Image (spheres, grey):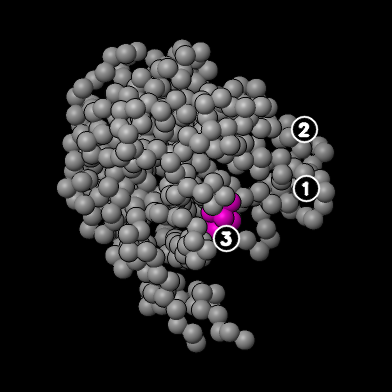
Amino acid sequence: MLEAAFHFPPDFRWGVATAAHQVEGNNTNNQWWAWEQNPGNIRAGHASGLACDWWQHAEADFDRAAAMGLNTLRLSVEWSRIEVAPGKIDTAALDRYREMLRGLRERGIEPLVTLHHFTDPLWLSEQGGWLHPHITRLFSRYVEQVVRALGEFTTLWCTINEPNVYSVMGYLRGRFPPGEHDQGKALRVLRAMLKAHAAAYRTIHSVQPQAQVGLAHNMRCFDPARPRMLDRAVSRWQDRAFNQTTLDAVWRGKWTFPLGWGWARGLRHTLDWIGLNYYTRDLLMFDRHAARERYTRTLHAPEAELLEGDYGELYPQGLYRALRRLDRLGIPIYVTENGIPDADDALRPRALILHLHQLWRALQWNIPVRGYYHWTLTDNFEWAEGWTLRFGLIALDEQTQERTPRPSANLYAAIARGDVISPSLVDVYAPELRPTLYLEPS
Ligand code: FCB
């Protein structure tokens, strides 16, 4: 049997990703908190509540991340805490974030700060949210305050998390606030977010010239269910709408179908790096009876291993495919999110190794992947799915706040500490992968 260790560069960034509303607790001043109060909006009637209690005790989890040997951590700051009313900044909230970022630095962990991760201040959503006519100016004003206050501790900024998911889930599928089903609005919101991203890119650089500014883009694989023309057509459509058009706007500076046509003024090359959030793939089939679903039915490959809670297929190759695609931009790439829901940790060790192996493959082609942020450190409030999906390396009992590391936490720590997936780690955590990872040459 051939033995191979899969090595990563010594300066590779190993981290975990989180978002304010999912971990801080008591974020009562945003549109998600309001949405959680209405029965039926969140699975099992759950609510974010105290979440992981980070607003008071984030440092205890920072200790855990440091003990795992992680050297970076992605977190977001909560607009509704910082700008409590239009133009009214709460300096105590900014001080708390300064304290958190200082705490990360003291532990040898570089913060990557996301400025918008799904939540909007209530005052903004009451005025139309991302459909507000002056949203670009409002967002930039907030961003400037944050960068002035926190720039001492980081140069790594992510403007907006997953504009495509925010617009689709909130305005097309109605699963996120404001719960609408309106394609026209979904496209307007997406355009607004991309314009605001570009303006924020410039604002950040004007405050902090050495800043490294990116966007976290959710890419999903869409493959035709059958080798038929119409299945191919719906897959291509989905791929354009969900994956490609955002990149065309912020990299090529062009509005492309279905987002629009022509030059996207001021948007070209507004990325110093691109963030990839990758989870799964869908197989798509044309269905002439499904007009409301844009003639598309979603299936899973018959041989696919399915993830908990109907989350989709385990499809690690999709990470490699997305990275190859992003390589065309010619800028550094961070995997800003990747993980699976798995309360028992039955599949996660294998999934983690397989995804990191695909990332390693991309590195062999000199694709400039600089870091990987696992979603996530401890179980947290999973938006419309409430507490039903458990993505944490560490299990959380949200009632008692008790934390219990899952085996995957030790596995990830060992990989991060050694910059390597070694055969002995495979043997301990996922021996069934031996034949897949160590093929005998024939
Ligand atoms: C992503 C979100 C993140 C988390 C994961 C599971 O789409 O950015 O907040 O909920 O999914």
Does residue 340 show up magenta in the picture? no
Quadrant (top left/top right/bottom left/bottom right) for the C terminus: bottom right
- In this picture, is 362 found above or below 334? below
Residue denoted by label 3 = 317
Does residue 318 show up magenta in the picture? yes
Disc number for residue 291: 2
Disc number for residue 88: none
Tag nearer the camera, 1 or 2 = 1
- In this picture, is 340 found above or below 188? below
Disc number for residue 231: 1
* Amino acid marked by disc 1: Asp
The first of marks 1 and 3 along the sequence is 1
Whether residue 149 is visible: yes
At 29% from the left and 23% from the top, the residue drawn is 145
Q: Residues within 10 Å of mark 3 (few under 14, many from 20)?
A: some
At 66% from the left and 32% from the top, the residue drawn is 256
Q: Residue 356 appears at what percent x and percent y?
A: 45, 62
At 37% from the left and 40% from the top, the residue drawn is 212
Q: Circle 1 — which element? A: helix
Alpha carbon distance from label 2 to label 3: 31 Å
* Amino acid marked by disc 3: Gln
Q: Circle 2 — which element? A: helix
The first of marks 1 and 2 along the sequence is 1
In magenta, the rendered stretch is: 317-325
- In this picture, is 366 found above or below 381? below
Alpha carbon distance from label 1 to label 3: 21 Å
- In this picture, is 75 found above or below 429? above
Q: Residue 85 appears at what percent x and percent y?
A: 32, 14
